[in-house]
Image (cartoon, rainbow, N blue to C red):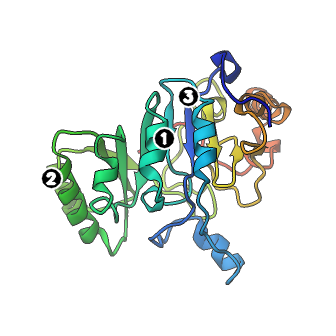
């Protein structure tokens, strides 16, 4: 493998956010998750039990510019990653964030308090475990006090006033989001936002890396892996970021041809979250 140290951040020009999938394991079966589709289509054959090698995590950290956002999740639950404290410590020069279902917040409190910058606790409509989740969240907030991380509560779908009132009492930032089909980023319950520049914002500044090192254009649901543009375990991130495939996708978006792309043709998301 080539020398992967970044000496000129311009080679990652425009990169603002990296989603780093430390693990694809999860401890919750959310009804609206795209994994339900994969499991239904491949009964008994889909096992999500992979963790990213900590050596690869370290090599990736050495290549990234300072002050960008690193989100330590993609499809898995980051609190299930045993090496989470070490992983977070590798990225002290970046903004460290992740999404979680919250089940392990208290158990892993000592590993993340003072290390992560922000954590988003994901809640969703028709979740039968929401009261248990809320109790764990309150205890974690008590344990961390004024220390980092700052906590956001992402509210997916219609939660009802009872739940919303309880979440507001925590003082955490509330982040409402609309739901889409578990089959992919389409059939949103509300009209999605199209940016005035006329092309997807996420594809311009985003990179997602899964547990094996596959680098994708974005974090959209992609079971066929159309969006994979390289392999971080074998190639420098700068080479992947400037690869012909990525440039081809960007040009198609700018020219209004996103509907011709395998990954983007059916996607209704344009890089602008909608509440």
Position of 12 relative to 40 (above/below): above
Looking at the rendered structure, the secondary structure element under dot 1 is loop
Label 2: which residue?
A: 142
User: Residue sitting at 80 percent across and 49 percent down?
Assistant: 262
Q: Is residue 93 visible?
A: yes
Position of residue 143 in the picture relative to residue 14 (left or right): left
Between label 1 and label 3, give the one nearer the viewer. Answer: 3
Q: Residues within 10 Å of mark 3 (few under 14, many from 20)?
A: some
Q: Position of residue 97 (x, y in %)?
A: 42, 41
Q: Position of residue 38 (x, y in %)?
A: 66, 71
Position of residue 121 in the picture relative to residue 47 (left or right): left
Looking at the rendered structure, the secondary structure element under dot 2 is helix
Label 1: which residue?
A: 273
Q: Nearer the viewer, residue 259 or 58?
A: 58
| Cα distance between the residues tagged 1 and 3 | 16 Å
Label 3: which residue?
A: 16
User: Residue sitting at 18 percent across and 58 percent down?
Assistant: 138
Residue closest to the far bottom: 44
Q: Give the mark, 2 or 3, whose residue is nearer the N terminus.
A: 3
Position of residue 189 in the picture relative to residue 112 (left or right): right
Position of 149 relative to 154 (above/below): above
Circles 2 and 3: CB atoms closer than 8 Å:
no
Q: Position of residue 142 (x, y in %)?
A: 15, 52
Looking at the rendered structure, the secondary structure element under dot 3 is loop
User: Residue sitting at 67 percent across and 26 percent down?
Assistant: 5
Between label 1 and label 2, give the one nearer the viewer. Answer: 2
Query: In which quadrant is the N terminus drawn?
Result: top right
Q: How many marks?
A: 3
Q: Nearer the viewer, residue 160 or 234?
A: 234
Q: Residues within 10 Å of mark 1 (few under 14, many from 20)?
A: few
């Amino acid at each position: 493998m080539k020398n992967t140290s970044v000496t000129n951040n311009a080679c990652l020009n425009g990169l603002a956010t990296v989603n780093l999938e430390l693990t694809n394991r999860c401890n919750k079966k959310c009804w609206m998750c795209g994994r339900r589709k994969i499991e239904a289509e491949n009964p008994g054959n889909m096992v999500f039990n992979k963790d990213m090698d900590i050596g690869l995590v370290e090599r990736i950290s050495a290549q990234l510019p300072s002050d960008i956002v690193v989100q330590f999740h993609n499809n898995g639950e980051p609190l299930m990653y045993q090496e989470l404290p070490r992983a977070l410590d590798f990225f002290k020069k970046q903004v460290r964030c992740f999404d979680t279902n919250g089940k392990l917040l208290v158990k892993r409190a000592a590993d993340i308090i003072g290390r992560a910058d922000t954590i988003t606790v994901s809640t969703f409509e028709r979740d039968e475990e929401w009261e248990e989740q809320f109790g764990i969240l309150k205890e974690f907030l008590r344990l961390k006090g004024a220390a980092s991380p700052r906590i956001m509560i992402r509210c997916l779908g219609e939660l009802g006033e009872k739940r919303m009132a309880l979440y507001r009492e925590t003082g955490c930032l509330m982040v409402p989001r609309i739901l889409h089909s578990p089959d992919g980023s389409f059939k949103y319950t509300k009209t999605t936002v199209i940016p005035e520049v006329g092309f997807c914002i996420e594809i311009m500044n985003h990179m997602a890396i899964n547990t094996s090192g596959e680098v994708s254009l974005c974090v959209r649901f992609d079971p066929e892996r159309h969006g994979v543009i390289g392999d971080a375990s074998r190639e420098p991130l700068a080479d992947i970021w400037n690869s012909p495939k990525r440039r081809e996708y960007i040009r198609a978006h700018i020219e209004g041809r996103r509907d011709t792309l395998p990954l983007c043709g059916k996607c209704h998301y344009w890089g602008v979250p909608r509440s």
